[in-house]
Amino acid sequence: MSPRCNSCGERIDTLTQQVSVMRREIKNLRQMLDSAVRAHRKQMTSIQSAVSNIGPREVVKAQTPLPSPELSLHKGTIQTVPIGYISSCFSVKNGTPRQPTICGPSRAMLRIQQSVFSNPEHALLGLEHYSHVWMIFIFHKNGQLSSKAKVKPPRLDGQRVGVYSTRSPHRPNALGLTLAKLDKIEGDTIYLSDIDMIAGTPVLDIKPYIPEYDSPITRKGIELCNSNAEQPYDTTVSLDEKSDLSDLQQDSEMDASDTKNQKPSDVFMEDCCARDKSQAEVLVTESSHTLTHLHSLLKDVKAYVAQHDFQVEENVSASPGTKPLELGLDPPRYGEETYSTIANWIREPPVSSLEVRFTPHAERELARFLPTHSSSLSENDGPRFQFLHSPEEAVTAIRGILSADPRSVYRRTRCKDRLFYFTLDTADITCWFGPGFAEVLQVCPVEELVSTI
């Protein structure tokens, strides 16, 4: 036989062996499937027999009374009811900013449902006096209810931290909190901006933002003002200052008694002098207040230093061969801002900001979009925005979204060469990412707007 025939015979033998192996595997799978079907039938038969043996009286006995709403509330178990659903310029998760300050022109609206209040516009009375509101909502697009103790924030580029040290949407209770700017209120509808919520987000509650309560910086300034206002300035003025003030007061009284017998010109001159004296009194009072504050501050420092020296002497005398122990309490820090701190990776994240570019084709396509308040209603006109006011505002929003790199860690590492798509208002945007930049390639109108609830 020729060598070619020998090689063909070897291949045929190999294929025959593979076919026999495949047949055995198929036979094993059939046997496993048959055994699983038989086990399933047995379980269903046992369940049906157990259900048929239970009588109606036993069912009533087996039912446990439902806990009252008051008891559930004490245990922390509540049933939430959304007060409304967001209509937003972001229709999908992809490209939605992770924080509200990333995209300033982003807008949304929320209509209070009548199922919550029969007159929902009454629930919004007085809210127009506030510029910002807290929005408590549900992350309804998580895709799963499970959560992990450690997560990978995109800003940390794959590093793991505890879920409660981040704002990850994947939490045991999928609740979100965002600070939105309140633009206006019309009836039962709230118009918002600076938002990071997608269309259809269920909103649970609205609370006004009050800097005096919610901002540690503002709260610290108010505490300092109140402490300065409550100090007893009059009781700590020196004797010389009191004598000067009394002399000024006596002179003013004597001048007031003498004005009855003076001419109008003299009275005018005396009024000018009285004004100068009153200004002098104000200056003296302010200087006395400043001195009083400095005196009290020096007393506090002196008392702290004396107490510190006394404790150090006690430690040295008790154990002369050892070092003095450090104090457990932190000393008062005058003039130092110690009211709030944040993690370092928030201000200096490993992921740097990106430069955003537009191709000429994308700029021309974006310029075709009409603003939402345009009066032109012709069918030949270009596409129209629903929330954004102009193409320039859309450019600003796109720059804010892409400069923060909205890609996940997986897409940054595994899908670097793939295009990135996201939706902003009524525009579908196509872009790609390079080293240190993001470039918008195409901007086209959405074919079908996502229907919001």
Image: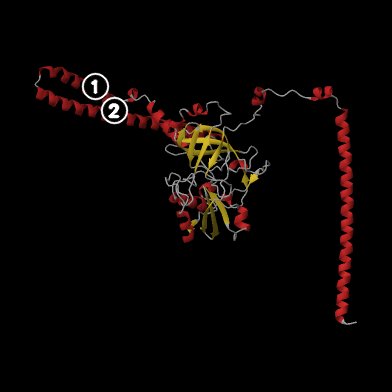
Under tag 1, what secondary structure? helix
Q: Is residue 226 above or below residue 365?
A: above
Under tag 2, what secondary structure? helix
Q: Which mark is residue 219?
A: none
Q: Whole-percent x and y of residue 125? A: 47, 27
Q: Whole-percent x and y of residue 451? A: 58, 42
For the view shown, which residue lies furthest in the bottom direction? 2
- Which of the colour schemes (rainbow, by chain, secondary structure, one colour) is used? secondary structure
Say which of 307 and 18 sits in front: 18
Q: Which mark is residue 246?
A: 1
Q: Whole-percent x and y of residue 115? A: 58, 29
Amino acid type indicated by mark 1: Ser
Q: Nearer the viewer, mark 1 or mark 2?
A: 2
Q: Name the residue at 54% across, 56% down.
A: 430
Q: Is residue 312 in sight in this rendering? A: no
Q: Is residue 123 above or below residue 355?
A: above
**Quadrant of the rendered image containing residue 126:** top left
Q: Crowding near pointer 1: few (<14 within 10 Å), some, many (20+)? A: few
**Quadrant of the rendered image containing residue 333:** top left
Q: Which residue is mark 2?
A: 285
Number of marks in the image?
Answer: 2
Say which of 405 and 445 sits in front: 445
- Which quarter of the figure is the C terminus placed in? top right
Question: Is residue 155 found left or right of 53 in the rendered image?
Answer: left
Q: Whole-percent x and y of residue 76? A: 65, 28
| Contact? badges 1 and 2 (CB < 8 Å) | no
